[in-house]
């Protein structure tokens, strides 16, 4: 097989995107950092917000600013989407809310914590199980370089 060709627009983000890795704990889920135009656009918007504001603010501030940046770039998204849990055909409103659903295909969970923990990844995996999206992004704005605070999960 030939050398992997990196799209020119993704080359500045590529160090953060290693080749796909099989997630050990569950064969249905895997960490996947392959370039995707929608994901690149989302990360670009997040980087713009992080450049302007820096780390250390409240999560709600980053959510509003990321929503504004997505709107400026004409990206279709929904914010604070309620996520009901269905148990044996009975929907229950447990209060789950998705921070962003972008283009109907990507769930974005915004965090502002010292470091991402396994519970944050588990939360996003749960959202991916309950919502029909193939990809999820976990973005932690409380880091010096935003690319160090981004995790991508693929269902």
Image (tube, rainbow, N blue to C red):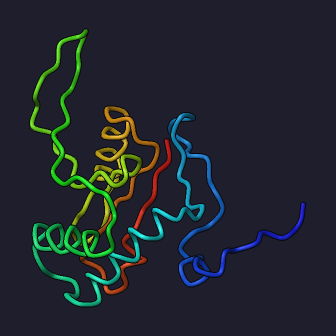
In the picture as drawn, the residue positioned furthest to the right comes out as: 1
The N terminus is located in which quarter? bottom right
Q: Residue at x 53, y 52 (%)?
A: 31
99 relative position to 95: left or right: right
Q: Residue drawn 33% across and 44% down?
A: 122
Q: Residue furthest top?
A: 88
Relative to 140, residue 145 above or below: below
Q: Nearer the viewer, residue 129 or 118?
A: 129
**Which residue is found at the position 66% from the left and 62% from the top?**
19
Q: Is residue 22 above or below residue 9?
A: above
Residue 97 placement (x, y as % from top left): 16, 45
Give how far across and how far down residue 51 sits, in percent: 29, 89
The residue lying toward the viewer, choosing from 28 and 40, is 40
Q: Measuring from the top left, give residue 22's x and y in whole percent.
A: 61, 47
30 relative to 71, above or below: above
Image point (18%, 12%), residue name: 90
Q: Quadrant of residue 79?
A: bottom left
- The x and y percentages for residue 108 are 31, 56
């Amino acid at each position: 097989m030939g050398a992997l060709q990196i799209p020119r627009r993704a080359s500045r983000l590529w160090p953060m995107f290693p080749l796909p890795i099989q997630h050990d704990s569950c064969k249905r889920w895997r960490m996947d950092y392959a370039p995707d135009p929608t994901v690149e656009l989302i990360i670009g918007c997040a980087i713009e917000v992080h450049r302007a504001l820096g780390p250390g603010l409240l999560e709600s501030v980053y959510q509003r600013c990321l929503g504004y940046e997505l709107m400026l770039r004409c990206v279709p998204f929904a914010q604070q989407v309620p996520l009901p849990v269905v148990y044996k055909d009975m929907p229950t409103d447990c209060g789950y809310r998705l921070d962003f659903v972008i283009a109907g295909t990507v769930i974005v969970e915004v965090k502002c914590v010292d470091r991402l923990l396994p519970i944050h990844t588990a939360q996003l995996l749960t959202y991916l199980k309950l919502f029909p999206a193939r990809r999820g992004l976990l973005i932690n704005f409380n880091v010096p370089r935003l690319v160090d605070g981004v995790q991508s999960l693929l269902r």
